[in-house]
Image (cartoon, helix red, strand yellow):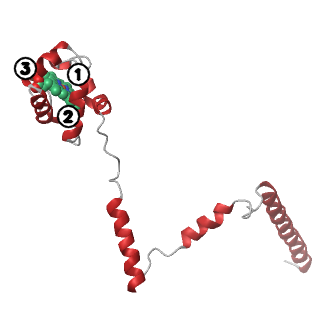
Amino acid sequence: MDQSEDRAFLRQFSGVIVAFIVLTIALIFLARYMQPEPDSSANPSQGILAEQRIAPVGAVRAGEAGAAALAEMQAAVDEAEPAGEIVVDGSTVYGGLCKTCHDTGVAAAPIKGSEQMAARLTEKGLETLVYNAINGLNAMPARGGNPTLSDEQIQAAVEFMLP
Ligand code: HEC
């Protein structure tokens, strides 16, 4: 390789590098044009969210102030409703599962609001009907097959089924 060849190579190679630099700068400007930098003052919740993300996970509560804060939190926990409010509404409970059998009389289930239901009520009394609904009776599974239903919910559903 003689010197003139070296020079030609260097010229071409630096030309390529310069071309890449120009291309990179052009791409940076193109990207900024397509997606301008977010203006944090435009969205006030951005700052708040950032604060929340970097907030410490725990806090030290010491002394009287700490005890008072803890007592306050404990009171709030005691007062809070259990998660997922329990519905003791007959029509809602009935609509969940009981309906599948008692609307049409699957497996000879007494149909809701029918004379059969009335006859069972006069024959056995409400308490027995509720007892049987809770514990199951022949083809009927206990609690209609939903063990999470409470006694009160079953009672409400039975009352809703009566004519
Ligand atoms: C898989 C079907 C099915 C589901 C679901 C079901 N039942 Fe029944 N149920 C029956 C059948 C069948 C009978 C009749 C049982 C018998 O007398 O042999 C019956 C009977 C009853 C009776 C009368 C009991 C008695 O002592 O005569 C009540 C009350 C009742 N069901 C309430 C409910 C309630 C409330 C639900 C929902 C929580 C429910 N059922 C869900 C099938 C079902």
Helix, strand or loop at label 3? It is helix
Q: Which mark is residue 102?
A: 1
Question: Which residue bears the numbered disc 3?
Answer: 123
Helix, strand or loop at label 1? It is helix
Q: Which mark is residue 65?
A: none
Q: Earlier in the sequence, mark 2 or mark 1?
A: 1
Question: Which residue bears the numbered disc 2?
Answer: 155
**Disc 3 to disc 1: CB gap under 8 Å:** no
What percent of the width, then of the height, locates residue 148?
23, 43
At label 3, which amino acid type do we have? Glu
Q: Which of 36 and 142 is in front in this view?
A: 142
Image quadrant holding the C terminus, namely top left
Q: Is residue 104 above or below residue 131?
A: above
Q: In this view, does 23 lie above or below 98?
A: below
**Disc 2 to disc 1: CB gap under 8 Å:** no
At label 2, which amino acid type do we have? Gln
Q: How far apart are marks 2 and 3 (CA)?
A: 17 Å
